Amino acid sequence: MGGPEGRFHFAIDRGGTFTDVFAQCPGGHVRVLKLLSEDPANYADAPTEGIRRILEQEGGVLLPRDRPLDTSRIASIRMGTTVATNALLERRGERVALLVTRGFRDLLHVGTQARSDLFDLAVPMPETLYEEVLEVDERVVLYRGEPGAGTPHEQQVGALARELGFAHVSLSSEAMPMVRIVPRGHTACADAYLTPTIQRYVQGFRRGFQGQLKEVQVLFMRSDGGLTPMDSFSGSRAVLSGPAGGVVGYSATTFRVEGGQPVIGFDMGGTSTDVSRYAGEFEHVFEASTAGVTLQAPQLDINTVAAGGGSRLFFRSGLFVVGPESAGAHPGPACYRKGGPVTVTDANLVLGRLLPASFPCIFGPGEDQPLSPEASRKALEAVATEVNSFLTNGPCPASPLSLEEVAMGFVRVANEAMCRPIRALTQARGHDPSAHVLACFGGAGGQHACAIARALGMDTVHIHRHSGLLSALGLALADVVHEAQEPCSLPYAPETFAQLDQRLGRLEEQCVEALRAQGFPRSQISTESFLHLRYQGTDCALMVSAHQHPATARSPRAGDFGAAFVERYMREFGFIIPERPVVVDDVRVRGTGSSGLRLEDVPKAHSGPPRVDKMTQCYFEGGYQETPVYLLGELGCGHKLQGPCLIIDSNSTILVEPGCQAEVTETGDIRISVGAEMASMVGAQLDPIHLSIFSHRFMSIAEQMGRILQRTAISTNIKERLDFSCALFGPDGGLVSNAPHIPVHLGAMQETVQFQIQHLGADLHPGDVLLSNHPSAGGSHLPDLTVITPVFWPGQTRPVFYVASRGHHADIGGITPGSMPPHSTSLQQEGAVFLSFKLVQGGVFQEEAVTEALRAPGKIPGCSGTRNLHDNLSDLRAQVAANQKGIQLVGELIGQYGLDVVQAYMGHIQANAELAVRDMLRAFGTARQARGLPLEVSAEDHMDDGSPIRLRVQINLSQGSAVFDFSGSGPEVFGNLNAPRAITLSALIYCLRCLVGRDIPLNQGCLAPVHVVIPKGSILDPSPDAAVVGGNVLTSQRVVDVILGAFGACAASQGCMNNVTLGNAHMGYYETVAGGAGAGPGWHGRSGVHSHMTNTRITDPEILESRYPVILRRFELRLGSGGRGRFRGGDGIIRELLFREEALLSVLTERRAFQPYGLMGGEPGARGLNLLIRKDGRTVNLGGKTSVPVYPGDVFCLHTPGGGGYGDPEDPTPLPGSPLQPLVFPERGSVYEYRRAQEAV
């Protein structure tokens, strides 16, 4: 942003609420300005108005708003904008038609087939961006090893569309040339949907200037942190345009002045908080979701969590809850005087941490009043009344809390909510959060920075002097970027290095020419080459640069990408696979034109002590304290301020907490040295504030255990499919916290831990680690191996708590590869069995003994031992390591609070879940009683073999308890549909959580109000030797159908996972396929989605065809298969696989005989159907469960069941609908994507 002297350089961040303007004026001094993004009564466009005001103030000449601005004094304008993001969030983009290969009209509707919220029975999903679909008769088949990512047919169709007069045409191969049609298709749709909106905005912006800015360099910020010319700014690269400026801002300022120490960016705004990391290079992701749309494009890894100043405050069943609902800009927090709800901002105002006098008078209906502390107090008092009613009348009577204590509690819970993604973001990649500096910016961040840093062990907070508009400053400091990328499918090996160099060289030329065309001399242009590498047979690809790994004799000329890949793989995952070939998925070059802004407004040195503007009262732990207030503009280099104090400027308020010290740096920034946290005085008695904090901490421990497991495991199932759970248990083996929430694992591990406690008794010693998978010992099915570590503490004879991790191993022997046989009739046929096995004894890993046990099934006729011993042993070691991480983290918690307090809160958090379920059962019983209905409900459904699943539920209204009696369910079956008791309990916890309808801790307490009766020897509690693999994936779904049917919650969903396995001597493939979801009171069932006890993502069609010998001929909705009703059931799927090689096809499915039921007069959904169409044209009905050889030219045609309808389809009277959904800011970023992927199992 250098350039001709005597001219202005503008950098403008147009946010959702405010527009920030940063101007470098002639002579080098800086002007900053903040104005409302929307103020139609006064101006048409905020960035234009900001430029006008600064030109007017600097020039001393009145510039009328109704005339285009003279551009002769403007050298450059750089802009970041939320126009694209807002259009996506509010679905206000261009009308779009999608053209797609015939047979795939619903591909983007189905997407990955996973639902976004596991426990919402309505299965809310964002609508697709297109209105119409045209199917094109064309097909290009990818053979294994081909790159894909678009075809010549796309170019032909695009040319035809332009000839027909379409003004904007987006081709997926141009929007993002990467393999995987689903995210590439979403990206192309987003590009078509958003780019015209952006172009209209740009044209409108141009009209505010003479000559339409032809003589001015105008650049826009892209999602990847680079600037691009105005005419090249496209929708799919624009969604993070605003937040990206902030990351560039702190990377160019904080990182440099803090001597290269890694930085966590903390940008807390009104509705959400953005968290990111910088350690010398930008951290990019290449696929992420925004507003429910998955975009395949380079984006800075900015993690958005729904916790901001406008996050709403609730007290629910004894728990302090912050967000995710937000007050939004309208009506805003209660203090905005527009009748809004109580929020984090209100809590800070009540605590004296915000001063109304420092805010402009823009609030109230007339937008002419100051902030209202009275409105904040009144709104918070209503919540405090709920809190104190619970404290005085609840299960553990306690003294009431003051209004300030309640406000402080909510602020502390909000801080803990924001710490969780920071821990995940750092530890996910093997970094220690305490080794980072916290760079704080955004309007609300300064009030929370000290507390966040202290909680994470950080000792420094850095707040730039322009922190209130750091995104605008980042735009001024950013470089211009041009990228070129193309798919590739080559091995990374000496024989391909010349080809790779040739392709990288061609892309580098494209980048250099594009930047030269923008006026950059070659001396200001740099390029960086990347290869998208992965180990063969895995999906875990890393985009690696070789800039720190110069070329060697055994690498491409562009650099030693292999060494860079191995180094990063080791850092992120803790191991490498040296014997495995490496594959190149994509080649990419990033060209950068350096523009080099120099900030010349060096702040003044201090003269004398800092002036106290006023004294105020701020509330901290222990009460109010006298707090001096300083004005940032009056502080000079070297000033030191002891906490507590407030530092205020026109854009933000900084709170320096007691025990911290702020210092003004040479560059005029604020550096806060964070003091150690005061020793906690928490007792064992229930405190609802600490209950909420411990709830976050316990969940964080389980999440961090999962990160270690994923990083150190080697198998695809655990590392990439994320099919695992980690959990923390109390001294009695009762579940305390569990992550992620895989439905079929919920509560099941508790049975496993409690079995070991009873089975081993006193034979548990320090250094022991246990292994179990037996169904009668709390197992689900044999491939799910559970590793349990008892934890001892000095002075205690028995374990003080337990940690465990359960992972799905790809093979543990048995009659078929994958250990998921469709026709097993005994447990031994399903693989290796561990009832209670000491995997580690006295601290020594028992490799020889566990190897023998894993190979033991090979002694049974027709069976094999494990087919992948190396992966089994590696993953078991990873599970032990994950447990060790949990022990370390709980040990730190005990060190902070004491053993008695931590154990007490393990009990309190279980009691809280119990309270939420009791409240739900009472509410259900009371509603039935009010309608004159009995307090007993029942339901019955059947497996396809006729086995009944029966349930009778008796509600005890006074206790808020219930008996769930499964007596009358069918006997154990000769087959594998038997469901171990633990599976039924998992299904029950899942249903209880769905019925509660909001976030609650999922632990042992959920089952405390419930007495479960399951007859021994039944299909739901079979004998120890019964086959169970189908019970885990199929019978579990029927149990859910029966429970939800008894409560009348919704019609039946497809009730099946549609398990399909394909294999031969050199390959194996497994998938589950979606169907229709059941309708309910106020919603239609979602079509083409997984429901209830599974949420597995399906393999992208291009990956499927490039790696396996099949062609996906058809993948679309099975129209009309959902049950009719006032609210329709969701439709199932039609999926056709054409085989290219001889293989064995196995199907394990249900709902082929009994239809998914409708409710309240709704009709049932259609049954599923499995057909095999032989090459000669014969069509064979395979039935629900079979294995059959298939040959080249054969086609498997799968029709999955639809969901049941709800309500009489002929009834014209609308049924009561669901209430309007509150405003929830959608999360995004790698932490969110990781959690989504974990729950998609």
Image (spheres, rainbow, N blue to C red):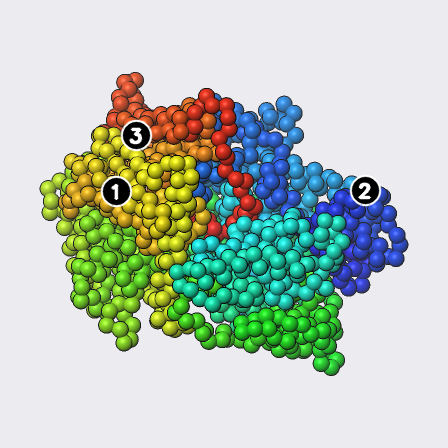
Residue under pointer 3: 1151
Q: Is residue 892 left or right of residue 1146?
A: right
Residue at the image point whose x is 16% and y is 42% from the top: 1017
CA separation, marks 2 and 1?
Answer: 79 Å
Residue under pointer 1: 965
Q: Which of the 4 image quarters holds residue 1138?
A: top left
User: Where does the C terminus fall, quadrant-wise?
Assistant: top left
Residue at the image point whose x is 58% and y is 58% from the top: 380
Residue at the image point whose x is 68% and y is 53% from the top: 337
Of mark 1 and mark 3, the one earlier in the sequence is 1
Q: The residue under label 3 is which amino acid type? A: Arg
User: Where does the N terminus fall, quadrant-wise?
Assistant: bottom right
> Are circles 2 and 1 on residues that touch, CB within 8 Å?
no
Q: How far from the left and from the top, in percent, is residue 392? A: 45, 63
Q: How far from the left and from the top, in percent, is residue 957? A: 36, 47
CA separation, marks 3 and 2?
Answer: 68 Å
Of mark 2 and mark 1, the one earlier in the sequence is 2
Residue at the far right in the pictured view = 61
Q: Please, what secondary structure does the residue beneath circle 1 have? A: strand
Front position in the image: 1195 or 626: 626
Q: How far from the left and from the top, in percent, is residue 395? A: 39, 60
Q: Please, what secondary structure does the residue beneath circle 3 have? A: loop
Q: Is residue 128 left or right of residue 73?
A: left
Q: Please, what secondary structure does the residue beneath circle 2 have? A: helix
Q: Residues within 10 Å of mark 2 (few under 14, many from 20)?
A: some
Q: Is residue 417 left or right of residue 841?
A: right
> Are circles 3 and 2 on residues that touch, CB within 8 Å?
no
Residue under pointer 2: 211
Image position of 678 with respect to 756: above or below:
below
Q: The residue under label 1 is which amino acid type? A: Asp
